[in-house]
Image (cartoon, grey):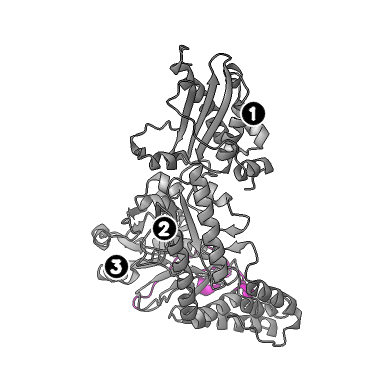
Amino acid sequence: MAYSDKVIDHYQNPKNVGTLDKSSKNVGTGLVGAPECGDVMRLQIEVDDATGMITDAKFKTFGCGSAIASSSLATEWLKGKSVDEALKVDNMDFVEELNLPPVKIHCSVLAEDAIKAAINDYRVKTVWKPLNLKKA
Amino acid sequence: MLTLSKAKIEPFAVILHYTNKTIDDMLKLPIYLDNNATTPMDPRVLEAMTPYFLQHFGNAASRNHPFGWEAEEAVDYAREQVAKLIGADPKEIIFTSGATEADNLGIKGVYEMYASKGNHIITATTEHKAVLDTCKHIEKTGGEVTYLKVKPDGLIDLQELEAAIKPTTILIAIMYANNEIGTVMPIKEISAIARKHGVLVFTDATQAVGKIPVDVNKDGIDLMAFTAHKMYGPKGVGALYVRRKNPRVKVTAQMDGGGHERGMRSGTLNVPGIVGFGKACEICMLDMEADNKRIAVLRDKLETELMKLEEAYINGSTEHRLPHVTNISFKHVEGEGLLMGFNKNIALSSGSACTSASLEPSYVLKALGLGDDLAHSSLRFGLSRFTTEEQIDYTIKAVSETVLKLREMSPLWEMYKEGIDLSTIEWAAH
């Protein structure tokens, strides 16, 4: 199976690899996937409390090239978005942008889950109510 | 290595020159280290086969003209070459389209032929799918199959094997060497137990024949499947060895037709393929010892250097193993992601199954007791007689660098380094 050029580019030059201080009040951390499934994504966002804008995003991912590319792309997309806008990122956005084949759809789902989990973690830390995350 | 005689082979000189050049040209990329999947053909094999496409194209079953006689003679000669490599009589070699067909013919053929004796077969969970799926088919038709578990080193427990034998047991089907981890089963001991109980022994020796010494008599094998393309021969030709003496074994044909191959496998013989198979066997017989010494040194270098990485684990027995194979898990790095770091330049395979719909990693590695995470993190290296030290040096560097790079990117590696026990985390399955 050949990867798309965009997947290869993100894999070779991943954007925003790293770690934010997860104990910080304005950092939200999402950890999704499982080692047994061959994919674990950790996505972190740093939010400006006053404006609700995402000022920084970092990821670390254990997984195939598509999983790494999806999480790298997620961090690019999140920076500069408001938390509300970030919630609108859909897994199909990743599929389209990265040309993911059907067997890699789960990577995009994982990326969407990671974004939602990170936002939720941030919300729980602040006065906001947690989201009802039922979509898998 | 590979000295080609400048004999009268002008039409093929270009091909041979090219092949020879790629072999001598030390670091031509991509590097091929997936030799358990298939091997490149040896140029000497191609040389032997070529006349049988255009000049001597006859049907080996044509009895009444020179075209047929030539083809038959070539097949007879190849049959001797093949038989000699495994210590068999030429009459005990049944040519097939490959090892999968030979597995089917050997197992189903015995099951049907010996139906009056019993319906029970013993095999192991780490067999190739060609054996496992054949056994599953037999179960559907009323047969009974015991799937022996393997120990963490990939070998079966001989006491468990003996305990599994029942009065209805007709066949023990255990592979000679495993395709993923290279583990070599104790075939001699297995056949001694089988013999004691009057049970036949079938072995899928696809990965072993031509790579290590296999002797059907010393090993006590009754039926054996093997193939040309894993031993520098052409694809599309293999063989089933069927013992003719002590005891005389018979199989029910799975392909009906003109009664070729003593009625056990009908179908016009693949003469060029068979000639190539014979030549490949002859070369293996002559070169195996010297090849293995050299290949084992390279494999050991590769393994030793890669094992210098933290949290790297060799899968399967290192004592009972093919000399050209190593299978290593690099913890907290996913195999497919790892391959992507160098798969333009190095051909390898992984036990990760991130591409398959089931997302299930290698069943062989899981059978060793590896967790799914380690099974997802494995790479299989298969060397060949054409592998060079320069290729191994390049591979060591590329794989090591990619493992380190991906670990920097891995949340699991970070947690491991922070001393977090990953088994205590509640993972969200997906």
Question: Which mark is first along the chain, 3 or 2?
Answer: 2
Task: Please name the residue that numbered disc 2 is placed on.
Answer: B127
* Label 3: element kind: helix
Task: Please name the residue that numbered disc 1 is placed on.
Answer: A93
Between B237 and B63, the residue placed more toward the observer is B237
Question: What crowding class fits label 2: few (fewer than 14 Cα within 10 Å), some (14-19), or many (20 or more)?
Answer: many
Q: Amino acid at mark 3?
A: Ala
Q: Are marks 2 and 3 in contact (CB under 8 Å)?
A: no
Q: Nearer the viewer, mark 2 or mark 3?
A: 2
Whole-angstrom CA distance, mark 2 to mark 3, is 18 Å
Q: Is residue B403 above or below residue B263?
A: above
* Label 1: element kind: helix
Residue B58 in view, yes or no: no
Task: Please name the residue that numbered disc 3 is placed on.
Answer: B194
Q: Is residue B257 above or below residue A35?
A: below
Q: Which mark is residue B24?
A: none
Q: Which residues are magenta?
A: B246-273
